[in-house]
């Protein structure tokens, strides 16, 4: 794993060094830059050495012919098989890296080579003959890649903060993205809060020439696998177990030790179990231990389950203590995330990455993605329950919606009732999109400054999801939701913070449960095998019964979470109050001081379930202080 950056159309060798310097954390082992002496072109690379630790793996790397130059971030898990195929065609190799395999494969197949890759990647390749720059990102969006395109300049980087080094960078915000970040708690791609900065969509390869608009060259779409039609549960279980094992084993390739997250939940436990199935492969596992054994509303204590899973599998478990003092690192979290995300779980990843780095475990396996492909979130269960009331006349559904407004928010059950029926009066498709939002649209809109609100009149924040769903061929509501989960919630929220927090400490985090072949299989499995009644991840749970204790597989649902509500009313409260003072809000001009004060009142009185919405406002302001005002954490 590494950090990459570069630009076309600018003749400034010092800029590329600054861009790489600001994200040196992504590659602590080496930093190299190359600038074309004749063209306005520069490429940079920060290296975290995982495969072929020698200098032969340095980047930017040229092919033997001197035509193509690559700067690349990621891992290609099938690189050995690809290398054999290339060698049979006469290609020779100077290193044992996957980088050189990717470079030669591009030489052989061009942008279409992306369809042959099994891995996670973000790369840029310069074609010196065609004078063309290619950018590509893996189909699940595991590795981040941002770009900005003007008529006279094109810049790209693994992290947005690299663009801040350019003296001509515009800090103009995208007001639509601000509103959408409030509503979703993360920013749906391809937008970002900067009007000029875009995320390269997952699976897309584009090309750029000096003075020209970027062109889409190739797109890798994750489609359901063939061959499952008519297969019964037993056959599907066997296929799933086989693919789970292959996916995890393929991601153990490394020339440095490999550790793993182990929360004691199904996803991380399954990954570790499959990694250890053929013998000792994991150096050690890591879990969060809440200080003093505290418990919070709606949160299950993971520690006991993590210990049970570790004993059963036979792996070493290191417990990383989470204390309230970690809240002093919120600004550090915001800086590394690049995008404001209303979640404090990234702090857990940061602490574990630090512990892993200190132990020499520079690669970690994560269970991220299991909920997104196998149906593990509460919204999936809520969607399933719609079959009991979604068919009702609109007048009855409007009554359910009214009851939800009157329902108290003081407990977890009341909050779930409100969320389930808050949009009961809307159409089935609208309700599908609403499950991804965290507050009524008008409530979030009212938080904005009057001027911004007027400019956003008529903007549909659900359109990005509506447009994406048009490309999905399935009809099952659960499958539709899982498609949106993988396209947006996974890529723009979970994977963004997983990558950024790991790389903040020079640790590569791999995600075997969203290996592209496993995702294709999961997409092909019928929806009623994934969400069976109120049992989420049914087929995944059944598949792991021979390998894990039932109490781990069928334990109460919890996520890789932090006690947001309790922290916001306790140790974080005064900090948020100070940052969101009336004076600060008026100076920024994005939010209405009066509406934010009402938001504080609703949180403090527990009148509405808007804790995460307040957290979003707070983290957007912290982001603005660093990325617009120039403050540092």
Image (tube, helix red, strand yellow):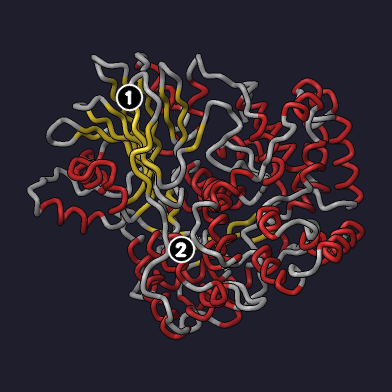
Q: Position of residue 555 (x, y in %)?
A: 64, 76
Residue 616: image quadrant is top right
Label 2 vs 1, first from the N-terminus: 1
**Could you tell me which residue is drawn at 77 percent across and 30 percent down?**
453
Closer to us: mark 2 or mark 1? 1
In-image side of 152 versus 386 (left or right): left
Q: Position of residue 567 (x, y in %)?
A: 77, 49
Under circle 1, the secondary element is loop
Q: Residues within 10 Å of mark 1 (few under 14, many from 20)?
A: some
Q: Nearer the viewer, residue 346 or 68?
A: 68
- The answer to whether the residue labelled 2 contacts the one labelled 1, judged by CB atoms less than 8 Å apart, is no
The Cα–Cα distance between marks 2 and 1, rounded to whole angstroms, is: 37 Å
In-front residue for pair 344/141: 141
Between residue 100 and residue 189, name the one nearer to us.
189
Label at residue 209:
1
Decide if residue 35 is on the left or right side of residue 586.
left
Element marked by disc 2: helix
Horizontal side, residue 235 vs residue 335: left or right: left
Q: From the viewer's side, name the closer residue of 134 and 290.
A: 134
Where does the N terminus fall, quadrant-wise?
top left
Quadrant that contains the C terminus: top right
Residue 10 visible in the displayed image: yes
Q: Identify whether 241 is placed above or below 440.
A: below
Horizontal and vertical percent position of residue 289: 64, 61
| Residue at figure coordinates x 80%, y 61% from the top left | 421
Residue topped by disc 2: 513
Give the total number of marks visible in the rendering: 2
Residue at image coords 73%, 55%: 563
Q: Residues within 10 Å of mark 2 (few under 14, many from 20)?
A: many
Picture quarter containing residue 521? bottom left
Q: Is residue 53 visible?
A: no
Question: Residue 129 placed where, x, y %?
Answer: 19, 27
């Amino acid at each position: 794993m590494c950090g990459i950056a570069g630009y076309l159309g600018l003749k400034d060798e010092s800029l590329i060094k600054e861009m790489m310097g600001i994200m040196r954390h992504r590659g602590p082992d080496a930093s190299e830059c190359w600038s074309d002496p004749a063209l306005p072109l520069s490429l940079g690379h920060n290296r975290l050495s995982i495969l072929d630790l020698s200098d032969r793996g340095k980047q930017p790397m040229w092919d033997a012919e001197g035509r193509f130059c690559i700067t690349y971030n990621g891992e290609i898990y099938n690189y050995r098989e690809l290398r054999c195929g290339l060698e049979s065609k006469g290609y020779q190799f100077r290193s044992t890296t996957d980088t050189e395999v990717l470079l030669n494969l591009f030489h052989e197949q061009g942008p279409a080579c992306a369809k042959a890759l099994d891995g996670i990647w973000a790369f840029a390749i310069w074609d010196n003959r065609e004078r063309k720059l290619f950018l590509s990102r893996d189909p699940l969006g595991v590795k981040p890649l941002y770009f900005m395109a003007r008529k006279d300049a094109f810049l790209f980087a693994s992290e947005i903060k690299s663009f801040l080094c350019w003296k001509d960078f515009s800090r103009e915000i995208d007001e639509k993205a601000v509103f959408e970040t409030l509503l979703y708690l993360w920013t749906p791609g391809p937008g970002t809060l900067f009007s000029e900065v875009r995320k390269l969509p997952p699976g897309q390869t584009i090309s750029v020439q000096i003075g020209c608009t970027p062109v889409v060259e190739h797109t890798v779409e994750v489609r359901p696998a063939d061959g499952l039609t008519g297969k019964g549960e037993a056959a599907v279980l066997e296929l799933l177990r086989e693919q789970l094992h292959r996916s995890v084993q393929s991601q153990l390739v490394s020339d440095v030790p490999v550790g793993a997250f182990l929360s004691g939940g199904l996803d991380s436990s399954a990954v570790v179990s499959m990694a250890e199935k053929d013998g000792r492969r994991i150096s050690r596992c890591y879990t969060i231990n809440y200080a003093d054994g505290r418990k919070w509303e709606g949160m299950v204590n993971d520690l006991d389950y993590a210990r049970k899973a570790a004993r059963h599998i036979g792996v070493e478990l290191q417990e990383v203590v989470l204390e309230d003092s970690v809240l002093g690192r919120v600004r550090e979290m915001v800086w590394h995330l690049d995008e404001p995300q209303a979640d404090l779980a990234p702090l857990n990843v940061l602490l574990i990455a630090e512990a892993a780095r200190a132990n020499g475990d520079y690669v970690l396996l994560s269970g991220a993605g299991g909920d997104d492909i196998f149906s593990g979130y509460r919204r999936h269960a809520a969607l399933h329950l719609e079959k009991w009331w979604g068919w009702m006349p609109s007048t009855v559904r409007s009554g359910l919606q009214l009851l939800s407004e009157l329902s108290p928010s003081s407990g977890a059950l009341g909050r779930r009732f409100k969320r389930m029926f808050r949009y009961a009066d809307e159409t089935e498709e609208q309700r599908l999109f609403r499950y991804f939002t965290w507050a009524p649209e008008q409530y979030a809109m009212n938080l904005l400054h009057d001027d911004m609100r007027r400019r956003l009149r008529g903007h549909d924040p659900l359109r990005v999801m509506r447009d994406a769903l048009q490309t999905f061929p399935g009809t099952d509501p659960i499958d539709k939701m899982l498609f949106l989960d993988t396209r947006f919630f996974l890529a723009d929220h979970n994977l963004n913070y997983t990558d950024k927090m790991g790389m903040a400490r020079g640790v590569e985090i791999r995600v075997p449960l969203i290996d592209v072949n496993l995702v294709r299989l999961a997409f092909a499995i019928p929806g009623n095998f994934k969400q069976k009644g109120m049992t989420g991840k049914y087929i995944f749970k059944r598949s792991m019964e021979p390998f894990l204790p039932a109490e781990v597989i069928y334990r109460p649902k919890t996520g890789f979470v932090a006690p947001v509500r309790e922290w916001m009313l306790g140790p974080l409260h005064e900090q948020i109050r100070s940052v969101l003072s009336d004076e600060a809000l008026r100076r920024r001009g994005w939010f209405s001081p009066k509406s934010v004060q009402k938001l504080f009142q609703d949180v403090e009185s527990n009148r509405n379930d808007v804790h995460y919405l307040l957290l979003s406002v707070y983290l957007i302001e912290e982001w603005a202080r660093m990325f617009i005002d120039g403050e540092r954490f």
